[in-house]
Image (cartoon, rainbow, N blue to C red):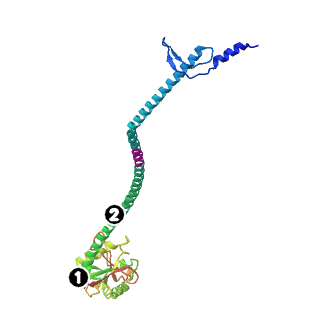
Amino acid sequence: MENPQRRTDAMQKISFIPKLSQVFFNNDGHFRSRYQIQGRDGSNRLVLLCLGLLNFVLLIIAVVLGINCAKVREGSFHVSHPAVTQVLDELNYLRSNHSDVIEAEEAAKNAFERAVKNHAQLKEKIEQQKTINDNYQKQMEELQKEQTNLQSNMTALEGNCGRCLSGWALHNSSCYYFSNIEPSTVTKNWHDSRADCIRRGADLIVIDNEEEQRFVSGSIGDMRGTQDILRNSFWIGLTDTETEGTWVWINNVTEVERRYWMDGEPNNSHHHGEDCATAVYSPSNPWKTRNDINCNMYQRHWICEMTSS
């Protein structure tokens, strides 16, 4: 069973009732107060008193430190606020510039894409233009050839203009029509050939000089369409119908030159009545160009002649 006296002593140790009194120091320098602390243990009361004083001092120190910190913080804020503002301004400026840079980069990218597209289109147009130029060049060359031909034809026409009909060749003062020019397949006998020349206002050719003989021989050589010189011959206005062996031109001029006949001609071969003369092309001798054949049995081209206007 617990001792009553011991419980009373314990309760006295942890309970006290202060009484307000004057504070003073005694003659030996010790702090004394008229507070009366009830309890038996005097050392405990002294510890509590010291702790109270220490708390009071710490409170004062905390208040002083708080005031000083507030002052320091306020001063630091006033000092650093402009720098912060400048940093923020620079940050905003950099953000704005960054946006501008992005926009500029996007614009440059779009411009580059447009330039590439334009380059491709320009290259395609250049290729098209090159093709067009090549076609123009070919057309120009063809036109130049045609111009040359036209000039050549104009020269020939200027020489014949007003003097010979179209399709007739001018030589000296006469115009000549070679029937094989249109159409070349049409042939006639001697009588029908002369009738065609008369219908054209002319008559079968009369060769009465060496120059005309050379012209006729050269013209036939240029126009020959077959290697058979006899089949490629042309009717001329020379016949011995009236008197066998006496060759007379249609202008009633008797032919006395023998050198223009082919070798062995005229021969009235096989007594077929070879009474009409043709002019042939002779590659060996341009003077020997005449041959006699039947006037009605053979179909040949013909040469018409009339005086130029």
Residue 86 figure quarter: top left
Marker disc for residue 173: 1
According to the image, label 2 marks what residue? 137
Asked if residue 63 shows in the view, the reply is: yes
Mark whose residue sits in front, 1 or 2 = 2
Is residue 31 a member of the stretch shown in magenta?
A: no
Relative image position of residue 85 (x, y in whole percent): 39, 42
C-alpha gap between disc 1 and disc 2: 44 Å
- Rendered-image quadrant of the C terminus: bottom left
Asked if residue 281 shows in the view, the reply is: no
Relative image position of residue 10 (x, y in whole percent): 67, 16
Left or right: 183 as drawn, with respect to 44: left
- Rendered-image quadrant of the N terminus: top right
Q: Nearer the viewer, residue 60 or 11?
A: 11
> Residues in magenta?
92-101
Query: Mark 1: which amino acid?
Result: Ser
Query: Mark 2: which amino acid?
Result: Gln
* Residue drawn at (39%, 38%) of the image: 78
Q: Nearer the viewer, residue 217 or 35?
A: 35
| Secondary structure found at label 2 | helix
| Secondary structure found at label 1 | loop
Relative image position of residue 260 (x, y in whole percent): 27, 76
Residue 265 figure quarter: bottom left
* Label 1 vs 2, first from the N-terminus: 2
